[in-house]
Image (spheres, rainbow, N blue to C red):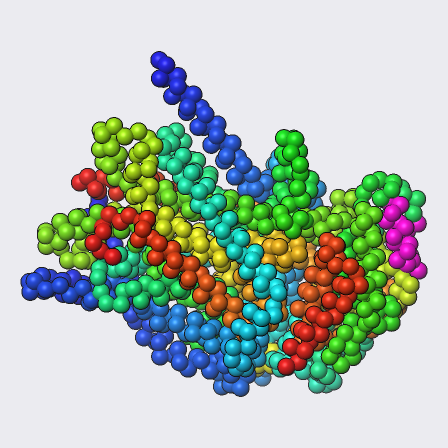
């Protein structure tokens, strides 16, 4: 009885703490959602208030219309194409590369690893002009190639992340599989991949969000608004000199968070209810 | 195709009883090598070349040798300022975010009720990170009559001019960085779940309490993930500039929020000084590289790999 | 379950590899040649056509050649919608012309344009800014000199304001056709001033009147007496009203005495100390146009460009009024500024057609009725008159204001040294240092001169 009460108090305390924390963390997001229901004129004059004075979806309708006849339906579709293709490619190839770096001994491995790490340390803004020139040469401007293709060669962040996960796995499993007569690739696909599903899902979530949110890449490489993703669409609401349609901007920002939210919600269970533990036991 | 070939090769190899790791290894990292040589090397090499030139992006680069580097180190006070700001930022914001993310991850990992919901909600701040809405919001939150100050006032604490006081402005950025702890949290969560439950069960049988289990199992087995987070967050911390850009625009007040990459961006695209900006980027690469190398060097003392033999 | 997953992965990985292999062989061989692309982009006309002609069908039809023009601008939702409407109208009037519109946000526009220049992939017609940007592009010889096109009447500027046309000239070439006119203005809240017993500003008001009004409002209501002044624009006006210029006529130095900067800084500092002028944190909290102090009824004055008045009044949701900047001699200081330009790329293969479109854009009444002065008050009197009937209250006030300034102003100074944007930044920093009392006004003026001259000297190298 005593223990039970203690458990209840602990649970209540935990929930209370989390609730408070979550509210604090989400305050800006809630503010944005509230703003999407407010009248454009009153966003700043009622900035302190979280509750909109009306429940009006007109800013959603207004925002969805997009720009010059290109609606957000187009932007969302484009974002989905770019994001799905590059996420899938990036995670699959990163896992492959990560296994190579984490589990196989080969000559100059350290050199390549260092090269890979170094590519993360140059700001994109510095290489973007030469990169533009190069992709322009390939004839890739105004296509999705510059946005998708590079991701198919692995993303250093993901490679390193998956590497670290592979390295937490006991080595005996590889050995056991080797004795069973498996080649390296079979070990990778049958033993390692199921075990690193949480890591791969983590990467998928990140990749989805990063691609979804990427602004500079699409801005540089896409010229036709019909090809723009959501991230470019959102920026087009505001201009330093003229009227910014804030409520439409907030409305579309809210919508643009939804897919990221859904993807996270669906995928996060694979991270935490990972197959890893069962895999280890079996 | 190449992979199938690799498998076939593997079979042959086994028959001969010979190890040929070079080939397999290179086959696995082949995608990286292709991407590296076909897409990365040229822009990177080009930016290195540009760092020795006077280049405004519109005209032809003019070779000036080490002039950019010399000017940077000898007589650019803003450059020195930006280094100070960035080092302070990295050494406060990164630990702050990591500790916070780990604490939340630990809290979430043991949660039973509504865990998926909390995980998702707590990840969300990272998702709206760089948007315009956040910049507007953040200014409202940290303004003189903003939410934060009214809380401070209610608690009877002195209020602070978060945006206007040069000694506090950087803290708003540090808080913003900490606020976006979602990705680190997620990685920690995945790492925590990767620790085999059997280890804990065994420890419990041995009579280890929660604290001992945390110190003896969780932390050591999490070290590879901690290493990852420390390395990546350090790199990202050095490269951070969006938060400063969207809230303080030009590093105001008094350049107290002038992060290195923000200044680099300013030089490149506001002042049309791409050669100089490239030089800044390469110096940054050296500095981050050095820090990363140090972290990796130190890792042999504190990072524990289950797969010890393979390094 | 696990089995299917791994088979799937194997397949995907195999696909991936084959794909990446075939994709890279093409890329690798091109890499070396690309080198020239960056290094010598101006000297390589052969490559130019590579990038530009992808979109151009070369078929002829009924005498007139079919052309595709690329048109690029930045802006907000209204500008995107209206400009696209004008483009559609133009296409229907000129069936042989197809215009591909490439519109973006202001954020990133210049980065993108710089990359396009480096890659020899510029659009035919593009939106350009006055000042540092035009100067920068002018020095690189990537924009077309449109003087011949205005002389042969392709672009008719006969009815345009002469002073404003001169602003598009850099290095003796006409590189930008102004799309509208702006002027600096003081936006004021008449009621706040009345409540404090202050007269509204008129053509002859002075900085002293401004100070007195600000102090009266502050004393009466505790509100601020004014918005924080953006030093770069306001100080340029201040210099001009004292008969001097920001930069010397040859662009090789500053054109004003240190005393002017000292006086100006001392004046704003004094106001800040009297609390009629907001401190830095307040200024930073209210960045967006729609969030300015005057919108919230917290200050009676706001200094800015006339084209921003629409956004401001809309957010304030009440009528505000306009006055020229404080005198004495405000007509020496005031000037009409081009809001935006259209420029033609030197690489464009359809310069004539591009010019025809620009001509239509500035001279066609129907087109301008669609645009409703979104890019500033139209530069020709004909168009202004054509629009007059349809204007709403705010826009009517702005048009009237521009007319009034047109008669009470002096030509714009369009000499900018290379590095002007860095000098502007230096001025903002100096201003901050004064406001934070790290520098005294006279020290700040000396420091600014030193830094500005260094930057100019470096630019001249």
Q: Is residue C236 left or right of residue A68?
A: right
- The residue located at (10%, 64%) in the rendering is B18
- The residue located at (53%, 39%) in the rendering is A26
Residue C349 at x, y = what percent? 57, 82
Where, quadrant-wise, is the N terminus of chain B in this rendering?
bottom left
- The residue located at (21%, 42%) in the rendering is A280
- The residue located at (65%, 51%) in the rendering is B166
Judge whether C361 appears above or below C396 on screen: below
Where, quadrant-wise, is the C terminus of chain B in this rendering?
bottom left
Whether C206 is among the magenta residues is yes
Instruction: Judge whether residue A67 can be spotted in this image.
Output: no
Residue C155 picture quarter:
bottom right
Whether C202 is among the magenta residues is yes
Instruction: Judge whether residue B257 can be spotted in this image.
Output: yes
Q: Which residues are magenta?
A: C199-217
Judge whether B258 appears above or below A5 on screen: below
Question: Observer-nearest residue: B182 or B7?
Answer: B182
Question: Observer-nearest residue: C292 or B145?
Answer: B145
Residue C153 at x, y = what percent? 73, 82
Residue A240 at x, y = what percent? 66, 58
Residue B35 at x, y = what percent? 35, 67
Question: Observer-nearest residue: B162 or C241?
Answer: B162
Q: Is residue A196 left or right of residue C453?
A: left
Residue B59 picture quarter:
bottom right
Residue C210 picture quarter:
bottom right
Question: Which residue extends farthest top?
Answer: A1
Q: Is residue C58 left or right of residue A247?
A: left
């Amino acid at each position: 009885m005593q223990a039970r009460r203690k458990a209840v108090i602990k649970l209540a305390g935990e929930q209370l703490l989390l609730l408070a924390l979550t509210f604090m963390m989400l305050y800006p997001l809630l503010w944005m959602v509230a703003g999407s229901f407010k009248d454009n004129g009153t966003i700043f004059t009622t900035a302190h208030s979280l509750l909109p004075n009306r429940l009006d979806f007109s800013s959603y309708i207004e925002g969805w219309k997009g720009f010059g006849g290109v609606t957000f339906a187009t932007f969302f579709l484009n974002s989905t194409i770019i994001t799905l293709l590059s996420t899938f490619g990036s995670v699959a190839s990163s896992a492959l590369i990560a296994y190579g770096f984490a589990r196989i001994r080969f000559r100059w491995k350290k050199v390549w690893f260092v090269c890979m790490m170094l590519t993360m340390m140059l700001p994109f803004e510095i290489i973007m002009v030469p990169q533009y020139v190069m992709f322009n040469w390939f004839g890739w401007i105004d296509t999705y190639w510059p946005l998708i293709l590079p991701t198919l060669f692995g993303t250093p962040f993901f490679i390193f992340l998956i590497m670290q996960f592979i390295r937490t796995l006991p080595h005996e499993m590889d050995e056991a599989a080797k004795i069973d007569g498996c080649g390296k690739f079979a070990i990778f696909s049958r033993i390692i991949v199921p075990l690193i599903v949480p890591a791969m899902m983590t990467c998928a979530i990140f990749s989805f969000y990063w691609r979804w949110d990427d602004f500079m890449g699409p801005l540089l490489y896409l010229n036709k608004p019909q090809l723009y993703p959501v991230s470019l669409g959102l920026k087009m609401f505001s201009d330093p000199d003229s009227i910014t349609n804030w409520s439409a901007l907030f409305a579309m920002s809210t919508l643009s968070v939804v897919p990221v939210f859904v993807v996270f919600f669906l995928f996060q269970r694979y991270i935490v209810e990972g197959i890893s533990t069962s895999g280890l036991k079996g | 195709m190449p992979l199938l070939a690799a498998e076939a090769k593997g079979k042959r190899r086994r028959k001969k009883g010979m190890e040929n790791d070079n080939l397999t290894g290179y086959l696995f990292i082949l995608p990286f090598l292709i991407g590296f040589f076909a897409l990365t090397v040229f822009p990177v090499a080009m930016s290195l070349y540009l760092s020795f030139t006077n280049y405004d992006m519109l005209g032809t680069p003019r070779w000036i040798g080490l002039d950019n580097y010399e000017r940077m180190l000898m007589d650019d006070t803003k450059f020195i300022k930006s280094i100070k700001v960035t080092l302070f930022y990295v050494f406060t914001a990164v630990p702050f975010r990591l500790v916070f993310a780990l604490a939340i991850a630990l809290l979430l990992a043991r949660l039973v009720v509504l865990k998926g919901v909390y995980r998702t909600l707590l990840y969300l701040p990272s998702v709206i990170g760089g948007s315009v809405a956040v910049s507007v919001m953040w200014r409202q939150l940290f303004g003189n009559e903003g939410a934060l100050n009214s809380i401070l006032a209610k608690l009877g604490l002195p209020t602070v001019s978060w945006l206007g006081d040069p000694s506090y402005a950087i803290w708003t950025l540090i808080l913003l960085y900490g606020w976006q702890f979602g990705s680190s949290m997620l990685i920690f969560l995945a790492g925590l779940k990767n620790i085999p439950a059997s280890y804990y069960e065994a420890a419990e049988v041995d009579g280890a309490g929660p604290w001992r289990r945390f110190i003896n199992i969780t932390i050591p087995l999490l070290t590879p993930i901690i290493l990852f987070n420390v390395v990546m967050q350090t790199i990202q911390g050095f490269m951070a500039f969006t938060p400063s850009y969207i809230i303080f625009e030009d590093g105001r007040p008094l350049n107290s929020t002038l992060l290195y990459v923000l200044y680099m961006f300013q030089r490149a695209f506001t002042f049309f000084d791409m050669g100089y900006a490239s030089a800044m980027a390469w110096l940054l690469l050296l500095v981050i590289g050095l820090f990363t190398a140090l972290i990796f060097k130190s890792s042999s003392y504190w990072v524990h790999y289950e797969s010890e033999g393979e390094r | 379950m696990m089995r299917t997953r791994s088979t799937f992965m194997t397949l995907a990985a195999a696909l991936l590899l084959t794909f990446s292999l075939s994709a890279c062989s093409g890329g690798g061989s091109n890499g070396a040649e690309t080198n020239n692309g960056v290094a010598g982009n101006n000297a390589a006309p052969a490559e130019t056509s590579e990038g530009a002609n992808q979109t151009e069908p070369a078929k002829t039809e009924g005498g007139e050649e079919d052309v595709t023009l690329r048109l690029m601008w930045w802006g907000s939702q209204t500008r995107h919608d209206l400009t696209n409407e004008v483009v559609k109208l133009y296409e229907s009037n000129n069936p042989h012309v197809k215009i591909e519109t490439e519109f973006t946000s202001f954020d990133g526009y210049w980065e993108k344009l710089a990359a396009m220049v480096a890659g020899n992939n510029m659009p035919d017609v593009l939106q350009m800014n006055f000042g540092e940007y035009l100067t920068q592009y002018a020095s690189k010889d990537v924009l077309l000199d449109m003087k011949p096109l205005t002389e042969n009447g392709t672009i008719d500027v006969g009815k345009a304001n002469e002073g404003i046309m001169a602003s598009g000239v850099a290095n003796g070439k006409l590189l930008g056709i102004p799309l509208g006119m702006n002027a600096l203005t003081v936006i004021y809240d008449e009621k706040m001033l009345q409540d404090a017993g202050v007269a509204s500003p008129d053509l002859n008001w002075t900085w002293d009147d401004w100070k007195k009004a600000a102090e009266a409002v502050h004393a009466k209501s505790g509100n601020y007496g004014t918005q924080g002044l953006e030093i770069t624009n306001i100080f340029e006006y201040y210099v001009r009203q004292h008969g001097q210029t920001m930069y010397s006529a040859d662009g090789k130095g500053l054109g004003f005495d240190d005393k002017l900067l000292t006086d100006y800084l001392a004046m704003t500092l004094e106001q800040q100390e009297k609390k009629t002028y907001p401190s830095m944190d307040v200024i930073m909290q209210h960045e967006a146009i729609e969030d300015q102090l005057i919108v919230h009824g917290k200050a009676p004055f706001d200094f800015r460009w006339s084209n921003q008045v629409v956004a401001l009044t809309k957010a304030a949701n009440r009528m505000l009024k306009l006055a020229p900047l404080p005198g004495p001699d405000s007509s020496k200081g005031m000037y009409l500024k081009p809001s935006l330009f259209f420029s033609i790329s030197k690489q464009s293969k359809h310069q004539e057609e591009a010019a025809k479109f620009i001509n239509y854009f500035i001279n066609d009444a129907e087109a301008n009725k669609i645009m409703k002065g979104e890019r500033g008050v139209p530069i020709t009197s004909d168009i202004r008159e054509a629009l007059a009937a349809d204007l709403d209250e705010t826009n009517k006030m702005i048009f009237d204001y521009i007319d009034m300034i047109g008669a009470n102003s002096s030509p714009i100074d369009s000499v900018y040294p290379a590095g002007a944007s860095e000098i502007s930044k230096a001025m903002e920093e100096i201003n901050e240092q004064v406001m934070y009392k790290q520098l005294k006004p006279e020290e700040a003026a000396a420091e600014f001169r030193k830094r500005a001259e260094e930057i100019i000297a470096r630019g001249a190298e």
